[in-house]
Amino acid sequence: MLKNQYRQLNFMALNNYQVFDIWTDKTGLGEAIPEDFIGTMQAIYRKHGWSDISRYQKEECLAEVKRVLDERYPGHHNYYFR
């Protein structure tokens, strides 16, 4: 069941240690998660080949996640990459 949730991008990694889910609407610090955040992260994963593990480019994907968090969601970048 969990593998299926990851394949559907209901759970996504933000880095090598942290995962978030699509149902959470606040960060662990109580801040609201931006409305377009989930769709943006899902699009990045799909762009890098998710969920076909033979095509998935993990390092490039996580680098883009980090870059987009820094550029578009700077407050969340600090939360996720402390």
Image (cartoon, grey):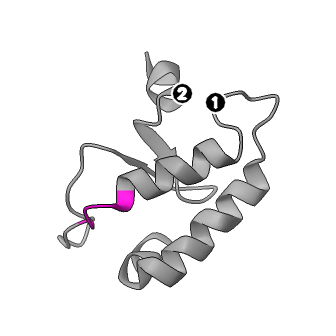
Q: Nearer the viewer, residue 72 or 76?
A: 72
Quarter of the image where one finds residue 78: bottom left
Q: Is residue 61 above or below residue 71?
A: above
- In the image, residue 27 lies in the stretch drawn in magenta: no
- Helix, strand or loop: magenta stretch: loop
In the rendering, at what x and y percent does residue 73 appear?
A: 41, 78
The answer to whether residue 8 of the structure is visible from this angle is yes
Amino acid on which the number 1 mark rests in the picture = Ser
Q: Where is residue 5 in the image (x, y as percent from the top left)?
A: 44, 26
Seen at 45% across and 70% down, the residue is: 80
Total marks shown come to: 2
Is 36 colored magenta in this rendering? yes
Q: In this picture, which residue range is highlighted in magenta?
A: 33-37
The residue lying furthest to the top in this view is 1
The residue indicated by pointer 2 is 7
- Check contact, mark 2 vs mark 1: CB within 8 A: yes
